[in-house]
Amino acid sequence: MNIYKLKYTTKAAAEKDLKAKGVYVVTEEGLTYATGIHAVVELGKIVTTYGTYDEEGNQLTAPIYASGYHYDVMCEQDIDFGSNSIEVKNPKHGFLGHNYLKNGNYYYSTTSGINACLQSYKVYHR
């Protein structure tokens, strides 16, 4: 199983490349996964520093985002994503039961991913 961490300039650029690489297939119903693609996770913009908010939910400081628009892909086949394939030292997302292996090092995202979800929940579900 291959896990790819991908970074694009925009969502539109990502979707165009994912279609061109055969990750997504356009059908009458819309986009679907191609054969051998198990998951495509649209992470979007990743928060590197969370914003702060008062008790009423008013923003005090804006969040800071990493550059780019991010996706994770899990698939059976080897796909050359070129410069869009990135190495991540602190993943914000992981696939349960699958470790992200890059350059011989395992990276785990369970805690950071859960913390990110909890932080988002606190901000948007007051």
Image (spheres, grey):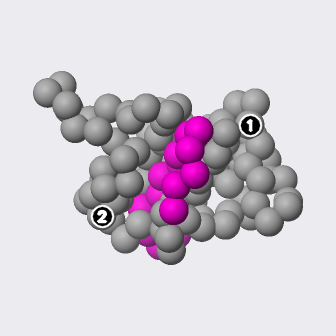
From the viewer's perspective, tell me whether residue 63 is left or right of residue 17: right
Instruction: Identify whether 7 is placed above or below 2.
Output: below
Along the viewing direction, whichever of 81 and 59 lies nearer the viewer: 81
* Secondary structure under the numbered disc 1 in the rendered image: loop
Residue 4, position as x, y percentages in the image: 59, 53
Q: Would residue 79 be counted in the magenta stretch? A: yes
* Secondary structure under the numbered disc 2 in the rendered image: helix
What separation in Å lies between label 2 and label 1 (alpha carbons)? 27 Å
Q: Are marks 2 and 1 in contact (CB under 8 Å)?
A: no
**Which of the labelled discs sits on residue 13, or is there none?**
2
Along the viewing direction, whichever of 51 and 38 lies nearer the viewer: 38
Q: State the residue at coordinates (30%, 50%).
A: 19
Instruction: Identify whether 57 is placed above or below 67.
Output: above
Q: Amino acid at mark 2?
A: Ala
Q: State the residue at coordinates (38%, 35%).
A: 34
Q: Earlier in the sequence, mark 2 or mark 1?
A: 2
Magenta segment boundaries in residue numbering: 66-80
Instruction: Identify whether 23 is placed above or below 52.
Output: above
From the viewer's perspective, tell me whether residue 97 is left or right of residue 64: right
Q: State the residue at coordinates (53%, 48%).
A: 72
Tag 1 residue: 98
Residue 71, position as x, y percentages in the image: 48, 52
Along the viewing direction, whichever of 61 and 88 lies nearer the viewer: 88
Q: Would residue 19 be counted in the magenta stretch? A: no
Residue 100, position as x, y percentages in the image: 73, 49
- How many tags in the picture? 2
For disc 2, the neighbor class at 10 Å (few under 14, some 14 to 19, many from 20) is few
Image quarter hosting the N terminus = top right
Residue 111, position as x, y percentages in the image: 77, 42
Answer yes or no: is residue 53 visible: no
Along the viewing direction, whichever of 102 and 91 lies nearer the viewer: 102
Q: Quadrant of residue 97?
A: top right
